[in-house]
């Protein structure tokens, strides 16, 4: 997965609580056996005025002009500002996939659903928890100043605003190290590939009957 150290990006505000995973990526798009192609259908029910189905040409679908991600000032946003209990509902890993593939690197909210929170880290998406008072201030600033950007400094664990204010956030050591190195759980395991191969060779030498018979 892509490493995360610092990120300076445009912020888009999604001003609603309890955004569930079916709203993030509706269930009809989960039929795909691939891990790619979900970005165009992120928040499908909010972004478009018609009902979306897999295989549709999204460039021909009518956009909802009132939805924040369709507004010109938020085009290219890579930081999503959200309200409490973001990512609630079913435990689909497709939700962080869709957010990433749309272009988001981080989310800032007062709280998240546990499974979504864990899935985000496993896929290189950084979910930052800030107190509600700080999130409220960020919503005010984003709406007041077009082109509002934030700097996220993962090594220092701070969000830096345009006026230089710094908001600290907590993150577990293992998760932080995984993001900094760009390694998911499989990548972490592959760091020990030589030891794994050595273990398997020794195991077969000691227990040769475990070797699969050929022919």
Image: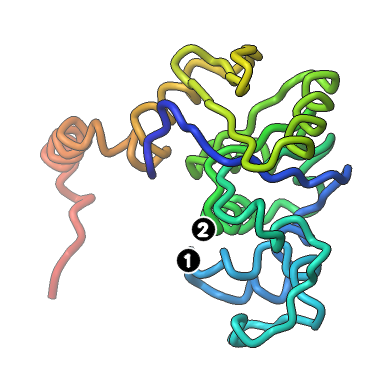
Q: Residue at x 61, y 23 (%)?
A: 162
For mark 1, give the secondary structure: loop
Q: Residue at x 85, y 19 (%)?
A: 133
Q: Is residue 196 left or right of residue 133?
A: left
- Asked if disc 1 and disc 2 are in contact, CB closer than 8 Å, the reply is yes
Write down the residue under mark 2.
101
Q: Is residue 185 left or right of residue 201?
A: right
Q: How many marks?
A: 2
Q: Residue most toward the right?
A: 17
From the viewer's perspective, is the residue at label 1 or at label 2 nearer?
2
Mark 1 → mark 2, Cα distance in angstroms: 7 Å
Q: Nearer the viewer, residue 52 or 147?
A: 147
Circle 1 Cα neighbour tier, 10 Å, few/some/many (<14 / 14–19 / ≥20): few
List x then y, in percent, for residue 11.
Answer: 64, 40
Q: Is residue 87 left or right of residue 158?
A: right
Image quadrant in which you'd find residue 38: bottom right
Q: Quadrant of the N terminus?
A: top left
Upstream in the sequence, badge 1 or badge 2? 1
List x then y, in percent, for residue 56.
Answer: 62, 87
List x then y, in percent, for residue 185.
Answer: 42, 38
Image quadrant in which you'd find residue 109: top right
Circle 2 Cα neighbour tier, 10 Å, few/some/many (<14 / 14–19 / ≥20): some
Q: How is the image coloured?
A: rainbow
In the displayed structure, would residue 108 be above or below residue 44?
A: above
Please tell me the numbered disc located at residue 196.
Answer: none
Q: Quadrant of the C terminus?
A: bottom left
Please tell me the numbered disc located at residue 36.
Answer: 1
Q: Residue at x 17, y 64 (%)?
A: 213
Q: Is residue 205 left or right of residue 199?
A: left
Q: Residue at x 65, y 55 (%)?
A: 95
In the displayed structure, would residue 84 be above or below residue 167?
A: below
Q: Residue most toward the front?
A: 145
């Amino acid at each position: 997965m892509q490493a995360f150290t610092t990120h300076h990006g445009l912020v888009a505000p999604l001003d609603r609580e309890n955004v569930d995973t079916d709203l993030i990526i509706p269930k009809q798009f989960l039929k795909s056996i691939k891990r790619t192609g979900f970005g165009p259908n992120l928040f499908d029910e909010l972004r478009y005025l018609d009902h979306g189905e897999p295989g549709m040409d999204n460039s021909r679908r009518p956009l909802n002009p009132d939805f924040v991600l369709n507004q010109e000032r938020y085009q290219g946003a890579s930081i999503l500002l959200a309200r409490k209990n973001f990512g609630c509902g079913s435990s689909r890993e497709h939700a962080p996939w869709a957010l990433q593939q749309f272009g988001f690197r981080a989310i800032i909210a007062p709280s998240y659903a546990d499974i979504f929170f864990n899935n985000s880290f496993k896929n290189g998406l950084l979910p930052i928890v800030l107190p509600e008072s700080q999130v409220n201030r960020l919503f005010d600033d984003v709406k007041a100043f077009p082109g509002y950007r934030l700097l996220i400094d993962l090594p220092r664990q701070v969000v830096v605003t345009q006026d230089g204010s710094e908001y600290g956030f907590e993150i577990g050591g293992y998760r932080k190290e995984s993001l900094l190195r760009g390694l998911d759980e499989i990548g972490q395991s592959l760091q020990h590939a030589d030891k794994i191969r050595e273990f398997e060779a020794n195991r077969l030498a000691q227990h040769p009957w475990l070797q699969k018979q050929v022919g």
